[in-house]
Amino acid sequence: MKHPKNIFLVGPMGAGKSAVGRHLARTLQLTFVDSDDEIESRTGVDVAFIFEKEGEDGFRKREAAAIDDLTRSDGVVLATGGGAVVKARNRSNLAGRGFVVYLYTSVDQQVARTRKGRIRPLLENDDPRGTLEELLQQRDPLYREIADLVVDTDGRKVHSVASEIIESIS
Ligand code: S3P
């Protein structure tokens, strides 16, 4: 097999990490995993409930444990949560155990793509756009620090982003 054993997708909320990840896993015959899903299946509750009961700190501890375990696998495409890069331990596990792809997404696109779907606790406030702007400013350098590849997802369909990733790894 020419392509890397593991592909780890990082990027902000609304980057399309899960959709692109599922597509990549199907095409490359790898196993798709998602750190938020893993946390939810381990705890039996959703991410919003964990934030409510344990705060962001509690969630980040669970996220770090899930990422540590999931990155030890072979042959996975992992979609991480948007804040996974904040902890140095996660950055080192991701960078050291697979090929990291940063799905760059403008704030406009993030706003559009996060309007519907599941609850994102960090955006449950009066100014979700302002939050996304601030988070991107803080996190963009961290995504880039560990990325082997940066792909711009703006205005693009899932299969087009996935094809660019496949071309650059094969
Ligand atoms: C978060 C992103 C979410 C989820 C949690 C916190 C963040 O995942 O992990 O709500 O800090 O950006 P997605 O990026 O899949 O929405």
Image (cartoon, rainbow, N blue to C red):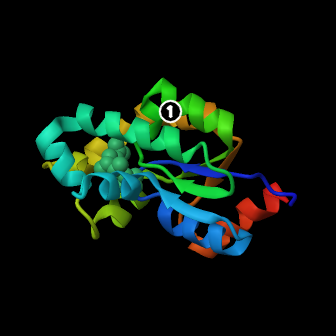
Instruction: Name the residue that disc number 1 marks.
Output: 90
Picture quadrant where residue 84 is located: top left
163 to the left or right of 168:
left
Q: Nearer the viewer, residue 162 or 76?
A: 76
Q: Residue at x 81, y 57 (%)?
A: 3
Picture quadrant where residue 131 is located: top left
21 to the left or right of 119:
right
> Residue 87: horizontal and vertical position, in percent?
44, 28
Which residue of the protein is positioned furthest toward the top in this rendering?
A: 88
Q: Is residue 59 visible?
A: yes
Q: Is residue 13 visible?
A: no
Instruction: Please tell me whether mark 1 sits on a helix, a strand or a loop.
Output: helix
| Residue type of the residue flagged with mark 1 | Asn
Q: Nearer the viewer, residue 104 or 89?
A: 89
> Residue 102: horizontal and vertical position, in percent?
59, 47
User: Where 123 sits versus 116, above or below?
Assistant: above
Picture quadrant where residue 93 is located: top right
> Residue 82: horizontal and vertical position, in percent?
42, 46
> Residue 160: horizontal and vertical position, in percent?
66, 72
Label 1 CA crowd tier, 10 Å (few <14, some 14–19, many 20+)? many
Q: Which quarter of the rendering shows the N terminus?
A: bottom right
Q: Residue at x 50, y 54 (%)?
A: 105
Residue at mark 1: C-beta within 8 A of ligand 1: no
Q: Nearer the viewer, residue 85 or 63?
A: 63
Q: Which quarter of the rendering shows the C terminus?
A: bottom right
Q: Nearer the viewer, residue 128 or 122?
A: 122
Count every numbered label the image shows and give the total: 1
Q: Residue at x 42, y 36 (%)?
A: 64
